Image: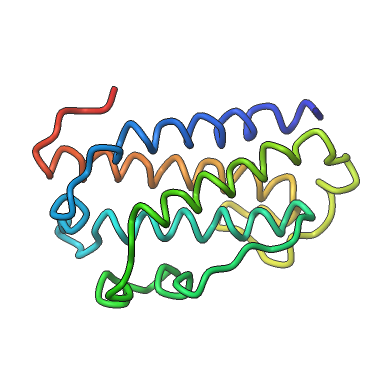
Amino acid sequence: MLSELVAPAHAYAFNGRFLEMLVGDFTPADWRVLDPVGHDPRWLLGHITSIRHRLVGLVGLPPVAAGWEASFQRGTTPKDIPGDFNPAEVYRAFQVAGGLLAGRWEALTAEDLAKPMGRTMPDGSTTIGDGLRFLAWHETYHLGQLGIFRRLAGKPGAV
């Protein structure tokens, strides 16, 4: 594995385990706890899973897509979440995408990482390699938010 992929690969792998610690014992009511801005854990789970789906395509694998992803883009709210949203199904999709990513790290080359991503991330990243690093941070940020929702639901901290 290229040295510049070690940290993001570790972050994505740990985040998969950490997500289980954060939401593995959530009840249906826990998934609907709202923060003062109006998001809920369902939105965060759908958002990070839709990003992982995009990452799969970004690293050169066949893209993964689900019909619910548009409901979790920037600017959407829990009101946009489909009525049949199933957190357990989306959690599994998150983990499957993580497995696809884990199986791809060794095959990525310096040339792959230097390719343009096709958009600029908020931190200024424009290449696939920089985008992978930024999106690992982005995912971890949202897992921290899930930790707050865990506490709002009256559960003990996960770590």
In this picture, is 26 found above or below 72?
above
> Horizontal and vertical percent for residue 122?
55, 57
In the picture, measured across the screen, residue 105 lies left or right of residue 125, that is right
In this picture, is 151 found above or below 118?
above
In the picture, measured across the screen, residue 61 lies left or right of residue 23, that is right
> Horizontal and vertical percent for residue 136?
55, 42
Residue extending furthest left? 154
In the picture, measured across the screen, residue 61 lies left or right of residue 56, that is right
Query: Relative to the observer, which residue lies in front, 69 or 86?
Result: 86
Q: Residue at x 33, y 61 (%)?
A: 86
Query: Relative to the observer, which residue lies in front, 57 or 99?
Result: 99
> Horizontal and vertical percent for residue 92?
46, 49
Q: Residue at x 84, y 38 (%)?
A: 107
Identify the image quadrant of the N terminus. Answer: top right
Q: Residue at x 75, y 53 (%)?
A: 127
Q: Residue at x 12, y 44 (%)?
A: 153
Q: Name the image quarter holding residue 90.
A: bottom left
In the picture, measured across the screen, residue 71 lies left or right of residue 62, that is left
In this picture, is 138 found above or below 144?
below
Identify the image quadrant of the C terminus. Answer: top left
> Horizontal and vertical percent for residue 61?
76, 55
Tally the numbered discs.
0
